[in-house]
Image: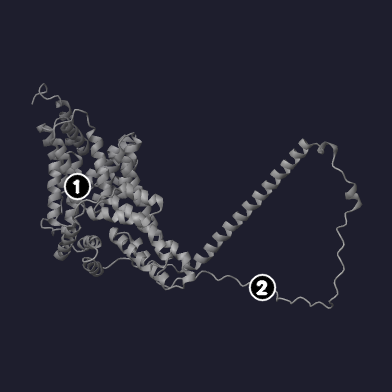
Amino acid sequence: MSAEQDPFQPHLIRADALFASGDVVQAGQIWQAILKRDPANPSARAGLYQVKRSLEARGGAGDRERLLREGCTLFEMGQAQDALAKWEQILAVDPGHKLARTYANDARRELGMEPLHGAPGAPPEGPDAPGAAPDAPREDPTAEAERLVLEGVQLFDMGMAEEAMVKWRRALELDPGQRDAPGYLALAGREQAAAARPAAPAPVDTQLEARIQRAELMLRNQRLPEAAQAFQQLMDQGARDPRIMAGYQQARALMVAQDQSQRIVVSLAEPLPPPPARPALDLPPLVAPPRALTTRNPAPRAGLRIPAALKAWRLPRWLQSPRNMGITAGAAGLALLGLTLYGVHRREAALREAVAEAKRNALQPVSRMVQIPNLTVPLEAVRREAEGAMPDDPLLAYFRAQEWQRLDPDDNAATLLLQKAKDMLSGPPPQAAVDAFEKDLQSGNLEGGRTLILGLLRHDPDDLDLRARARRVLLALVPLYAAEEKMEKAKAALVLGRALFPQDPGWQARLKLLEAIQAMAKPDRAPWIQLLG
């Protein structure tokens, strides 16, 4: 195609020169930008295929792939300094990593720094490297599937959606239980469907939409710090979309919840010590009053004697007027009120300090004896819980079957049980809405809120937003149940929370803490019940 026929010919020539000089990333970005303007451009698509072959020839997996991917994500969000730190970690252990060196030089140029020089004597990469074993053993299917997912993400970020989907489908063939590949396939399918639809009359910021969907995918895959960072970057750039703020708040709420769950782990290997006993008061023995020695009536008491000087004292003349007397009385009243408030403040401050000191003294022996128990639920226990909950609670059975399938992807019984529970949950959508749930929580009707949110979860058990709302109401109900001695209800709420968030050890820690509380005397339970929420 001549320069007159193709307006992108100067950019294509520059991309070819960059690729020939080893600047694969910059060349790929130019070809990707051309394809966004002209999806049918054959030269740009052929160039991206060259990038694909270069990535495949490079090889590598594990920590280097993870660091390379994290650096690309940070660089796309405008955080060049953090991205450079990721790529320099790769170069510290592998100075000959060409792609990491190329990315690092791009970041250094953007930051105004000198580029890195080539590593002298660095071994070449790829299958043609000297000393490479021709018949290397095949890598583990799970690790190979993870590598294919990462390669697909890199291809998808460069605009090669079809090639990325081939990688993700291959990853699912190797590892059917792979968690990230289905989400990426759904995202790519939505983008392809949106591209196939006729353009709407109003202009749409496709780049912003893609970044929002990528951040939402991070949130669904529980990559909470990356999701929060992506949403924060969009807000800092002035993007206006209600999904951005909602996604950021949800990511931050889940991060805070996970942080609180980590702090709740206490010493469960030894019995909890009771709160310190109150010191006995050393009171003098009571002495009976002496009995009257006579029955004669005592002499009447003399009245109050007022000194003569006080009787002769008179108010000053200026204070005898009603106006001045009122002003003086008001000032005295304000002074008295101020002294009273100051005394109340000092007593409250002393009380708060005494309470804090008592808590520190009570928790000091616990902190010395603290041990971190094994809070992992074994596979056999998950299987028994899933099968036992099926007749009465298909929602709990569904969540535990999901965890069973995650722990043992090759067990067909887990798949069958999961499908059976899903069929039992299917039905007409509930009439309740999330707004009604929030109203119940604001009015203090926690039982009603629990009923509403569980009804919504039975209709859509995989909704992360509904799970987060269920977590709020369950954590609010557990200490209330325990304080009312409804230990079975408290345990049922904790078991459901553990099923909703199987990878959060805080729920298992609360269950063990509840068992320890039940073994304590009732007067000693109150300080520990608060830790259940």
Residue 95 in the image: above or below residue 496: above
Along the line of sight, the residue nearer the viewer: 128 or 259: 259
Vertical order, 519 against 482 (above or below): below
Residue 18 coordinates in the image, percent (x, y): 19, 34
**119 to 288, vertically: above or below:** above
Three-letter amino acid code of the residue under disc 1: Tyr
Give the residue drawn at x 31%, y 44%: 247
Q: Determine whether the residue tagged by mark 1 lies in a helix, strand or loop.
A: helix
Residue type indicated by callout 2? Asp
Of 171 and 380, the residue lying toward us: 380
Q: Quadrant of residue 156?
A: top left
Q: Position of residue 293 (x, y in %)?
A: 83, 78
The residue lying at 51 percent from left, 66 percent from top is 362
At 78% from the left and 37% from the top, the residue drawn is 322
| Lateral position of residue 132 relative to residue 376, left or right | left
- In the figure, 137 relative to 326: above or below? below
User: Splitting the image into 4 quarters, where does residue 190 fall?
Assistant: top left
Gap in angstroms between the C-alphas marked 1 and 2: 73 Å
Residue 32: x and y in percent read 18, 35
Instruction: Specify the label residue 184 is tagged with.
Output: 1
Work out which residue is located at the far left of the displayed protein and give it. 1
* Residue 481 visible at all: yes
Classify the position of the C terminus by image quarter. Answer: bottom left
Q: Tell which of 520 and 134 is nearer to you.
A: 520
Eye-nearest disc, 1 or 2: 2
First of labels 1, 2 by sequence position = 1
Residue position for label 2: 282
